[in-house]
Image (tube, rainbow, N blue to C red):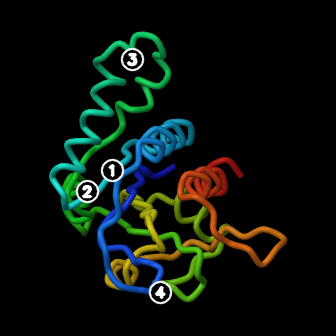
């Protein structure tokens, strides 16, 4: 399998009216996405925010679980949080792999019209299992989803996670776990 990483994007994302905003980091997202990343073999989990205080908050949360008393009490949580990388934006995450030529970016979206080249699950799994040397970086949006500018730059768009009803507004934590399961465990 190719190298896999995920990013939780807090900017640029959309609010309910479609305006581009910066969303707040949540403690639960950091914990739960790091555990999903570790479970499904993602080598890094990037938390992106252009706000220094938000990045400092993530660093404090991670530090508490890696170096504080909680890391000693719950070693498996410490192990998961060791994969967290705090960056200002997606560009910094991409740069950590040596630049855009070394990264294939896939987006996730609850909307089928979000942009990007549509991949079905079979095609995505085949690409992930190919011998392409690029890292696959899967972007997960917060708030009401990734901004069109990020979607336009993506190499692929994964299918929305849907259920048997018309309702479709999963937490990013649930969507990440389901997405990673469908990509690597099937």
**For marks 1 and 2 on the same chain, the one whose residue lies earlier in the sequence:** 1
Badge 2 is on which residue?
93
Q: Residues within 10 Å of mark 4 (few under 14, many from 20)?
A: many
| Pointer 3 local density, CA inside 10 Å: few below 14, some 14–19, many at least 20 | some
Q: Nearer the viewer, mark 3 or mark 2?
A: 3
The residues bearing labels 1 and 4 have C-alpha atoms spaced at a distance of 22 Å
Q: Which residue is mark 1?
A: 46
Q: Taking 146 as reference, is 113 left or right?
A: right
Rate crowding at label 1 as few (under 14), some (14 to 19) or many (20 or more) other CA atoms within 10 Å.
many
Q: Nearer the viewer, residue 128 or 61?
A: 61
Estimate the x, y position of residue 125 in percent, counting from the top left: 61, 61
The residue under the point 35% across, 52% down is: 25
The answer to which of marks 3 and 4 sits earlier in the sequence is 3
The structure residue drawn at horizontal position 40% and vertical position 10%, both measured from the top left corner, is 72
Q: Earlier in the sequence, mark 1 or mark 4?
A: 1
The residue beneath circle 3 is 71
- Residue at the far front: name it: 17
Q: At which x and y percent is residue 34?
A: 45, 40
Q: CA distance from mark 1 to mark 2?
A: 7 Å
Rendered residue at 22%/48% (across/down): 55
Kindly identify which numbered label has been placed on residue 115: 4
Judge by depth and name the residue closer to the eye, 165 or 138: 165
Element assignment for label 3? helix
Q: Residue at x 51, y 70 (%)?
A: 108
Q: Which of the 4 image quadrants contains residue 57?
A: top left
């Amino acid at each position: 399998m190719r190298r896999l990483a995920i990013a939780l994007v807090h900017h640029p994302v959309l609010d309910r009216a479609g305006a581009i905003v910066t969303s707040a980091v949540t403690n639960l997202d950091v914990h739960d996405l790091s555990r999903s990343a570790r479970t499904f073999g993602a080598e890094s989990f990037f938390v992106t925010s252009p706000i220094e205080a938000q990045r400092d908050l993530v660093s404090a949360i991670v530090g508490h679980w890696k170096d504080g008393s909680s890391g000693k009490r719950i070693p498996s949580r410490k192990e998961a949080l060791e994969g967290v990388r705090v960056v200002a934006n997606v560009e910094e995450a991409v740069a950590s792999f040596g630049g855009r030529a070394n990264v294939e970016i896939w987006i996730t979206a609850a909307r089928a019209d979000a942009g990007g080249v549509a991949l079905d699950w079979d095609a995505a799994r085949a690409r992930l299992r190919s011998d392409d040397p690029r890292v696959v970086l899967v972007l997960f949006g917060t708030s009401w989803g990734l901004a069109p500018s990020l979607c336009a730059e993506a190499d692929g768009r994964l299918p929305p996670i849907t259920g048997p009803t018309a309702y479709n507004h999963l937490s990013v934590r649930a969507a990440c776990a389901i997405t990673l399961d469908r990509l690597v465990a099937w």
